Image: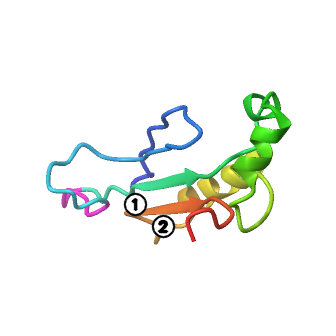
Amino acid sequence: MSPPHFCQQRSLSDYTVSRNRDDGNLGQGTGAAPIRVGAVAPGFIRTPMVAGMNPEALAKVTAPVSLGRLGEAAEIAQAVGFIFENELSTGRCLELDGGLRL
């Protein structure tokens, strides 16, 4: 089985993994070698940029998060590792936002 193909955009709100296809069917492969795709959509993550935010603004950003805290970079890395290690994971986006989108 071929390894997953990942392309990362450096942004707090948009980590995308995709393959250049026009039909929108992610993870269906080409027939010769299956291509796995996966994405991680993090919410607000504790980073040096976020640490420099005004405390009142940070409180407003964190308030709607059901978990009640910022995510950690290690939590995002763990999810990416899951996508790499689990061959059944393909064509999906893991939303890691602490319940922000509920």
User: The N terminus lies in which quarter of the figure?
Assistant: bottom left
Give the class, few, some or many, for how many residues have Cα within 10 Å of label 2's Cα (few <14, many ≥20).
few
Q: Is residue 42 left or right of residue 92?
A: right
In this rendering, position of residue 20 left or right of residue 65 = left
Left or right placement of residue 78 versus residue 35 in this view: right
In which quadrant will I find the C terminus? bottom right
Q: Nearer the viewer, residue 51 or 36?
A: 51
**Relative to residue 52, is residue 39 depicted above or below?**
below
Type of the residue with mark 2: Glu
SS under mark 2: loop
Q: Position of residue 14 (x, y in %)?
A: 49, 43
Residue 50 % position (x, y): 75, 35
Residue found at x 74% / y 53%: 62
Q: Which residues are magenta?
A: 27-32
- Image coordinates of residue 28 in percent, x first then y, are 26, 63
Residue at image mark 1: 1
Q: What residue is drawn where x is 38% and y is 58%?
A: 36
In front: 10, or 80?
A: 10
Q: Are marks 2 and 1 in contact (CB under 8 Å)?
A: yes
Q: Is residue 24 above or below residue 50?
A: below
Type of amino acid under label 1: Met
- Which residue is at the far left? 23
**Above or below 10: residue 89:** below
> Is 28 part of what is drawn in magenta?
yes
Secondary element at image label 1: loop
Q: Which mark is residue 87?
A: 2
Q: Nearer the viewer, mark 2 or mark 1?
A: 2
